[in-house]
Image (spheres, helix red, strand yellow):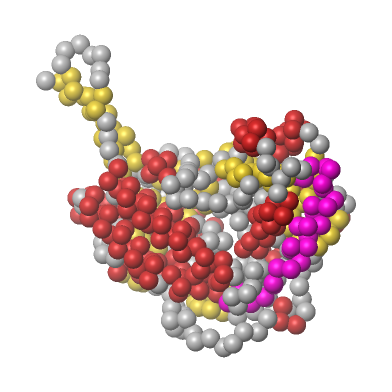
Amino acid sequence: MNIAAQAPHPFLDGKPKKLLIDGKWSDAITGTTFPSISPVDGSTLADIAQGGVRDINLAVSAARKAFEGPWSKTKPFERQAMLLRLAELVERDFHDLATLDTLDMGAPISFTSGRKTRAVGLLRYFASAVMMINGDTTGNSLPGDFFTYTLKEPVGVVGAIIPWNTPVTAAIWKLGPVIATGCTIVLKPAEEASLSSLRLAELAMEAGIPPGVVNVVTGPGDTAGAALAAHTDVDKIAFTGSHFTGQKIVQASARNLKRLTLELGGKSPHIVFADANLDEAAQGAAMGVFVNSGQVCAAGTRLFVERKIYAEFIERVADLGRKLPVGHPLDPSTQIGPLASSAQLERVTSYLDLGASEGARPIMGGARLTEGDFAKGYFVPPTLFADVKDNMRIAQEEIFGPVLSAMPFEGMEELVERANSSIFGLGCGVWTRDVTKAHTVARAVRAGNVWVNNYGAMDVQMPFGGYKMSGYGRESGRESLEAYLQTKAVYLRF
């Protein structure tokens, strides 16, 4: 797993990382910090300011002042120019941003660097969307002469809480619509992976986004995140993370009836019919869950295979999984890096033990890697369980690791019922040459995203979100902008 010695990352200069509030970098009020831990070997990458309730209060005040001040007078063309400039800077520095994510949370550099087109594309999409925010003129049936129309106005101060699995693009998913609509933001990154969000904030300032419009407070979710969710001067929370935390945010939002966008977890069915191109389907089934070590909310973790090909197909998937190189995430050949944290390692390995105790049979992987260079890191190999039953916890609960549960199915009616028997509804994959089967499943499965003969494709113009406990609201596309806007009805009598 050893790789050649690399020059230190320019952002990791040995100095503690600070909070960004009202355009100024500052220590947390308490002066405390927390370490950013390398998942490769447990070493400390940087010390980061540990923001708390008082820091959140300052950041929200700064965001409110900016929202009600000069920022409210900016023209769409000005906001568009800022987003386009930020897109240029992200494109220029994306290798450094991707490397920060790789160092911070362990995703292979081949994965993080491969998200450049998406990150830059999102910013350019939201820049184009600035010019498409319009109200409507309407007819009316009122007595007398009335002119009726609607205005679209920014919702206000947005609290954004993002996860650690794809930090750069997760931050851009929140930041883009905020700038496009004229809102302001307080961003709370995950404590496991805060570095790239801080660097992105530096680029936002370089792009000319005014002080107070973008604020970043790092710190624990149960203090800084909870304070942001409960703050009565925050108009909207945009959250990506677990459904457990999502439920807490819903409860906290009741204090002032905040707007909410919740992109939560998943336990997505990945369906393979016997008539599919099995080579492509096997590749899709493997990488639909093993990419980023399974730390993807929409991962296809429940593999349903038509019984007549079940035994052969899961061996194909297992063979592909065994060949995936596990190693140092900065090695370009690595496809499976470490899990993001010691807590995530403990969670995933507990499910490995649970699956075996429930009677599932691991035909690949099944235990943490501890030999040699893996000993100090948080490495779990791709794992495939066969003989899985629908009611097993490994088939019902989100693991967020490289763990796949394989199950055979017989007919369409049975398949749809089983695919839908989950509290989640984020994604679904379907492999078939039969267009009727494809459309039947796409309509019948209760999920926000359906991929046919591919898994995980995402486009900046397409909405992304879930049904059921996978949350509500959408990221990307026109639907995402609406969540950051208020609609005002105006009646003018003349």
Q: Nearer the viewer, residue 220 or 422?
A: 422
Helix, strand or loop for the magenta stretch, by majority: helix
Relative to residue 148, is residue 92 depicted above or below?
below
| Quarter of the image where the C terminus is located | top left
- Is 321 covered by the magenta stretch? yes
Please report the residue visible at 84 percent of the width from the left and 60 percent of the height from the top.
363
Q: How many marks?
A: 0
Residue 260 visible in the picture = yes
Residue 384 visible in the picture = no
Query: Among all residues in the image, which is located at the extreme top?
Result: 143
Q: Position of residue 346 (x, y in %)?
A: 72, 64
Which image quarter: residue 315? bottom right
Which image quarter: residue 354? bottom right
- Is 386 covered by the magenta stretch? no
Tell whether 309 sits left or right of 489: right
Tell whether 286 sits left or right of 316: left
Q: Which residues are magenta?
A: 304-330
Please report the residue visible at 33 percent of the width from the left and 63 percent of the height from the top.
86
Q: Nearer the viewer, residue 374 or 215?
A: 374
Relative to residue 168, is residue 394 depicted above or below?
above
Q: Position of residue 474 (x, y in %)?
A: 48, 43
Relative to residue 113, is residue 175 depicted above or below?
above
Please report the residue visible at 66 percent of the width from the left and 63 percent of the height from the top.
293
| Quarter of the image where the N terminus is located | bottom right
